[in-house]
Amino acid sequence: MLKTKLARWLTAAVLLILLVTISVWLIAFRTVAQEPFPDMAAEFNHGSIGNEDVQGIPYWIWRVLPTLFNDYLPGPTAYSSLGLFWEPGAELPVGFSKKVVGTERVSINCAFCHQGSYRLHPDEQSRLVVAGPGNRIAVQGYLRFLARAGNDPRFNADTILDAITLIYEMPWWQRLTYRFLFIPATKRALQEQGRNFAWTDANPDWGRGRIDPFNPIKYGILEMGNDGTIGNSDMMPLWQQALSEGENSAGEPRSLHWDGLSTSLHEVVVTGAVGDGMSYRNYQRNAVNKRIARIETFVRELTPPPSPYSPERDPSDPFHVDPQQVARGEALHREHCALCHSPDGARFRTPIPVDEVGTDRHRVEMWTAEAARRYNNYRDKGKDWGFSGFRDIDGYVAVPHTGLWLRAPYLHNGSVPTLRDMLRAPEDRPEVFYRGYDVLDAENGGFIADGPVAQRVGDRYDTRIPGNGNGGHRYGTDLPAADQSALLAYLKTL
């Protein structure tokens, strides 16, 4: 009799443990595939890259963070104050995915950095540019916001659950998992992320539209240690990436990134996701693998929106350009620019030695031969990613002029605000301006970079700070004024 009761108790205990184990697994680790997206642009903007289990923040915590910690944001418009584009009616801003990994989690994806916006006039709504240059995005601002929130005493279960209750009636079981599992775990994760990026406080700020993308790789993934280098550079648009593949007309491999540190578009796409937290396991999962492949295909052919500068506009329109000026400017571009910046040019998408181009050296000094060697041999828990395209080149890539009207500020570090300024000698270029305002400068080509509104919504950029130098690239600066005006007219139309 006693043995029978004991057996029943043991059986019940085992079943209870099994039930609890299954419940914990379902709550913390169960993965549910995303619903299909209506088109590839929507998938690029909101699709998962398989990093939610590492980088994902439980959705309801993410939702209330701006309410609880608005004092750590640059403005009153929550996440939008960080320059993120939020489409009308969308659940998340561009650059964020939501996926169930135990619970609904929010994480960044490729579009977090690669999104753009512009306005022709201050009184109109911003227009989204898919996979464009992140001209407004404050990547460092977002990271610092999360770290400060995670280290704030207000980040506790009572405060966060009270804030969630105001917008969502959470079931009791979900409240329990948030209180005892997700809130404490998220707090620890944000604190750890803050420690991992503490080195950025000793370097010049990235500012809007910029990021130091490879020092985090060196210090974290490649375990090389902090060497004090500065890799701050503009976030590049992902347009017509097919032009970066193969060889140029001189038979040299075409290069990617500002400093040509890779010759493989596939590896650039994959390592971009790795840098955002994608694990080898998730990369190998069929759905994620296909998504990465779709992103690669998408950016190969994606084109920027057409330039608003046109001879067909009314001559009184500030975006009208004279057709004769444009024609003469096109001839000047072929003569002075095409060798490097046109797809049929012998130096197209190849690194120009930094001693020749003369621009700020910090970015090329950040990436080293040892970093390239380690990334080509990178292992994730013993799994070989098969990278081979990384290298160290002491120069900056001659990038295409595709969508040039939207690429401001110019040069690899975004140190020259307008196209007109690019045609000025370095000593005559603006020493201080503001980045992050998305109203186009119709006269000068680029975005308005000074004045009360630009100063209020943008970040101050000082070219005297290390890594921010605006020297070099003197090509075209010695042309006669009439030729410069014609070339400027043509460049605006690209």
Image (cartoon, rainbow, N blue to C red):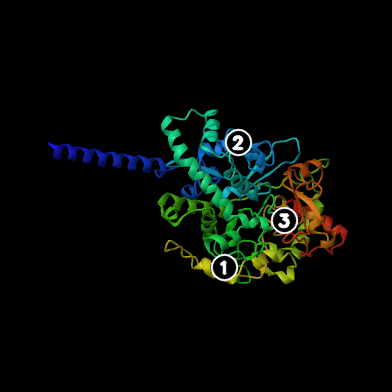
Residue sitting nearer the eye, 251 or 141: 141
Label 2 or label 1, whichever lies nearer to me, is 2
Q: CA distance from mark 2 to mark 1?
A: 40 Å
- Which residue is the site of mark 1? 371
Contact (CB < 8 A) between labels 3 and 1?
no
Residue found 81% across the figure and 52% down from its top: 324
Horizontal arrangement in the rendering, residue 470 relative to residue 231 (left or right): right
SS at circle 1? helix
Looking at numbered disc 2 in the image, what kind of residue is underneath it? Answer: Leu
Label 3 or label 2, whichever lies nearer to me, is 2
User: Which quadrant of the view contains residue 17?
Assistant: top left
Where residue 330 appears, as percent x and y from the top left, is 76, 58
Where residue 431 appears, as percent x and y from the top left, is 81, 56
Residue sitting nearer the eye, 374 or 147: 147
Contact (CB < 8 A) between labels 2 and 1?
no
Tell which circle, 2 or 1, labels the residue nearer the N-terminal end.
Answer: 2
Q: CA distance from mark 3 to mark 1?
A: 24 Å
Label 3 crowd (10 A; few <14 / some 14-19 / many >=20) = many
Q: CA distance from mark 3 to mark 2?
A: 34 Å
